[in-house]
C-alpha cells in the first residue's frame, strides 16, 4: 500500500467532512517514527498537516488554529498558526517541510509553494529551539535514570538541578524577572519521609499571572516525574527511555543540517543504523544506565552544535518582509476564492 492510500481509510473521513479542512488542506504528511525512518513493527502512523484559514478567519470573525483527531493521532494546523511556529524553527513543525517526497500524503499547489519557500523560515532561532528541545529530552533521560539508581538524598539534589535548569529556561523564555526574587535551595526535610528536600523563598510584586503559572507548572512537571517511583512498568519504560535517547541524538542531527547546510532533512537515512541501535538499547548497560560511549557521542554532538551555531551562514532572524509577502500571497488566494 502506498502511504497516500491511508487517507482512503474510513477513520480519516473527517479530513473531507470537517468544515475547516476539506479543500482548505494544503499539506498532509507522515510524522513521528515513520517520517524519521525509525519505525518498528508496532509503530503507530501519525499524520500532521496544514490547512488554509478560511475567508471568515481572515476577514471575518471566526478563528481556526488547529484540528486534532485523537483516534488517528492526526494534527492539522491552521496556516497562520503554523507560520508562527515555523518562524521560531519549532522542531515539531519545521520537520513537516523536510519530509521525503513519498511521505507527503497530499500536497496542493499552495502546499508546494510553501515547500519551495522553506528556507525563508530558517534562521539562528534554530539554535535555541532545537537546543531547548534537546535539553528537555536529556533532562527526561536523567530524571528516569535518577528514579531508579539514586539514593533519596541524591535524587533530591538531582530534582533541584532539574528545577534550576527549568528556571533558567523560564527566565530565557520570558526575558525578565525584575519584579521580585525567587531562591531555591536544599535543606533538612520537613517531610518526615525525606532526608532532604527543596525549599523556596519567593517575593513578587506586580508579576504577570500567566508568567507565574507557567513558571510553577514547569517546576511541578519536573518534580512530578519523581513521584512515579515504584509505579513504572520497567520493560515498557525502558523502551520509552531508549526512544527518548534516540530522539535526543536525532534532534542534534536535524539542527546540524539546518545550521550547516540550510537544509531540513527529517528522514535520517545515513544515520538509520545508529539511531536504531540506540532505540534497541545497545547503548544501555545491564543495570539500565547508559554506556559512557553514549555520553561521549552526546558530548560530541553538543560540541558540533556549538561550532555550527558560531559559524552558520543563517541570518539572525528570518526575513520578515519576504515571509509576509508569501503569507499575503497565499491568504489572498483564499479571500479571492482561488483555492
Image (tube, rainbow, N blue to C red):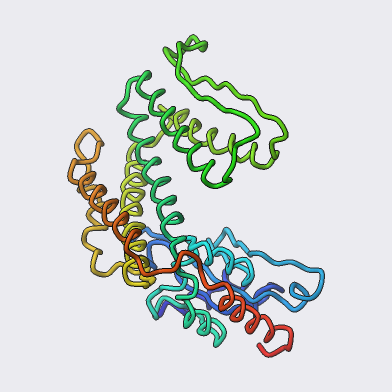
Counting from the top left corner in percent of width and height, residue 249 is at 31, 54
- Is residue 91 something one can see in this rendering? no
Q: Quadrant of residue 30?
A: bottom left
Q: Nearer the viewer, residue 198 or 30?
A: 198
Counting from the top left corner in percent of width and height, residue 294 is at 22, 46
Q: Nearer the viewer, residue 317 or 163?
A: 317
Counting from the top left corner in percent of width and height, residue 133 is at 43, 51
Which residue lies at the image location 64% right of the left edge and 70% below the top edge? Answer: 80
Q: Quadrant of residue 181?
A: top right
Report the quarter where the N terminus lies: bottom left
Residue 109 higher or lower than 196, as above or below: below
Which residue lies at the image location 17% right of the left edge and 45% below the top edge? Answer: 293
Residue 120 higher or lower than 173, as above or below: below
Report the quarter where the C terminus lies: bottom right
Residue 248 higher or lower than 176, as above or below: below
Counting from the top left corner in percent of width and height, residue 333 is at 67, 86
Q: Nearer the viewer, residue 218 or 124?
A: 124
Q: Is residue 215 left or right of residue 141?
A: right
Which residue lies at the image location 74% right of the left edge and 84% below the top edge? Answer: 335
Q: Nearer the viewer, residue 84 or 303?
A: 303
Residue 246 higher or lower than 119, as above or below: above
Q: Is residue 28 left or right of residue 207?
A: left
Q: Is residue 220 left or right of residue 300?
A: right
Which residue lies at the image location 37% right of the left edge and 73% below the top edge? Answer: 263
- Is residue 282 something one can see in this rendering? yes
Q: Is residue 97 left or right of residue 306?
A: right
Amino acid at each position: 500500500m502506498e502511504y497516500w492510500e491511508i487517507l482512503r481509510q474510513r477513520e480519516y473521513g473527517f479530513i473531507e467532512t470537517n468544515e475547516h479542512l476539506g479543500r482548505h488542506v494544503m499539506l498532509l504528511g507522515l510524522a513521528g517514527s515513520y517520517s524519521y525512518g525509525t519505525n518498528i513493527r508496532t509503530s503507530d502512523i501519525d499524520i500532521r498537516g496544514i490547512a488554509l484559514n478560511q475567508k471568515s478567519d481572515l476577514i471575518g470573525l471566526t478563528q481556526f488554529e488547529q484540528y486534532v483527531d485523537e483516534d488517528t493521532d492526526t494534527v492539522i494546523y491552521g496556516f497562520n498558526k503554523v507560520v508562527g511556529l515555523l518562524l521560531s524553527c519549532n522542531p515539531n513543525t519545521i520537520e513537516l517541510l523536510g519530509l521525503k517526497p513519498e511521505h507527503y500524503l497530499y500536497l496542493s499547489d499552495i502546499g508546494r509553494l510553501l515547500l519551495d519557500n522553506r528556507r525563508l523560515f530558517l534562521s539562528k532561532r534554530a539554535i535555541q529551539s532545537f537546543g531547548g528541545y534537546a535539553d528537555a529530552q536529556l533532562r527526561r533521560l536523567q530524571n528516569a535514570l535518577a528514579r531508579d539508581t539514586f539514593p533519596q538524598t541524591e535524587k533530591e539534589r538531582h530534582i533541584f538541578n532539574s528545577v534550576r535548569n527549568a528556571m533558567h529556561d523560564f527566565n530565557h523564555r520570558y526575558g525578565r524577572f525584575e519584579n521580585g526574587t525567587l531562591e531555591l535551595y536544599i535543606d533538612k526535610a520537613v517531610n518526615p519521609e525525606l532526608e532532604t528536600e527543596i525549599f523556596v523563598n519567593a517575593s513578587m510584586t506586580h508579576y504577570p499571572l500567566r508568567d507565574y503559572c507557567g513558571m510553577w507548572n514547569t517546576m511541578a512537571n519536573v518534580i512530578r516525574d519523581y513521584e512515579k517511583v515504584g509505579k513504572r512498568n520497567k520493560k515498557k519504560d525502558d523502551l520509552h527511555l531508549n526512544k527518548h535517547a534516540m530522539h535526543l541524538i536525532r534532534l542534534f542531527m536535524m539542527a546540524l543540517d539546518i545550521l550547516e547546510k540550510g537544509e531540513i532533512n527529517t528522514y535520517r537515512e545515513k544515520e538509520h543504523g545508529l539511531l536504531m541501535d540506540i532505540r534497541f538499547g545497545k547503548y544501555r548497560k545491564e543495570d539500565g544506565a547508559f554506556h559512557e560511549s553514549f555520553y561521549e557521542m552526546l558530548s560530541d554532538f553538543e560540541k558540533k552544535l556549538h561550532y555550527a551555531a558560531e559559524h552558520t551562514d543563517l541570518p539572525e532572524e528570518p526575513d520578515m518582509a519576504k515571509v509576509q509577502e508569501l503569507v499575503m500571497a497565499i491568504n489572498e488566494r483564499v479571500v479571492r476564492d482561488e483555492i
